[in-house]
Image (cartoon, rainbow, N blue to C red):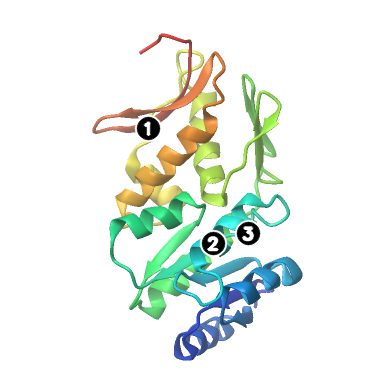
Amino acid sequence: MTNHKVLVVDDEPAIVDLVRQLLLRRGYEVITAVDGDAALQMIYDAKPDLVVLDLMLPKLSGWEVCRRVKEDEEVRSTPILMLTARREDRDLVAGLELGADDYVKKPFSTAELSARISAILRRSKEEKTIKQLTNGDLYIDLENESASLRGVELSLSLTEFRLLALLTERMSSGTPEGVGKTVTRETLLSCIWNSLEYDTRAVDVYISRLRKKLNDGKTPALTIQSRRGRGYRLVWELQGEI
């Protein structure tokens, strides 16, 4: 059995009941909300380990709930899995750019939803033998899941943090100094999302968003290079380098 607490937010009673029963059978503690205002309050009061969040909610949309959570230091590390019935790429991208950690499209299979929830919780609670990573002016605290660049803490979602940690691990052993080893897209999908079938557009969104957060306008710049047909690598670049 597990002590993980999951907040399920949806204004459709049938969906709430379906997800609630699924999670209860798997040993999770489940709390629920039917609108955005109630969800936001419960995130602060109940401190859930994960939020399963519908986007189309009354009072306060799922997008707005996500935005407020990810901008508040007190709760921004709370993982959010979006439920969306919308199919447009721009809606998916908008949710990911706000800091959501994963998504499932409606109608969904209970097996897929359960697997996504388990993967997020496993990643967020897994024990780490290495407590920190450092490379130049980048410091990563694996135990507390926080990162800072030149002494300034980075505001990262859980998935962004995992991506940065993975790229930094490969950078620490990279050659030459200051250039990380290339991490393939398949490796990212396997290590971060535990799947090789994850939508690669979401990977691009996360990489793009993380790249922007690493850009502090200082030299040497820490950036993520895209290597066509190969993957991504983390590098320190001097101004003017290609």
**Helix, strand or loop status at disc 1:** strand
Q: Nearer the viewer, mark 3 or mark 2?
A: 2
Q: Position of residue 156 (x, y in %)?
A: 58, 44
Q: State whether residue 92 is above or below residue 156.
A: below
Q: Position of residue 181 (x, y in %)?
A: 42, 26
- Report the residue at 46% width, 69% height from top: 55
Task: Locate the N terminus by quadrant.
Answer: bottom right
Asked whether disc 3 touches disc 2, contact meaning CB atoms under 8 Å apart, the reply is: no
Q: Position of residue 7 (x, y in %)?
A: 61, 74
Q: State whether residue 237 is above or below residue 209.
A: above
Task: Locate the C terminus by quadrant.
Answer: top left
- Report the residue at 38% width, 29% height from top: 182
> Distance of mark 1 from mark 3, alpha carbons?
26 Å
**Helix, strand or loop status at disc 3:** loop
Label annotation for residue 122: none
The amino acid pointed to by label 2 is Glu
Say if residue 169 shows up in the picture. no
Q: Nearer the viewer, mark 1 or mark 2?
A: 2
The amino acid pointed to by label 3 is Thr
**Residue 115's image quarter?**
bottom left
- Which residue lies under the disc numbered 3? 78
- Which residue lies under the disc numbered 2? 64
The amino acid pointed to by label 1 is Tyr
- Which residue lies under the disc numbered 1? 232
Q: Residues within 10 Å of mark 1 (few under 14, many from 20)?
A: many
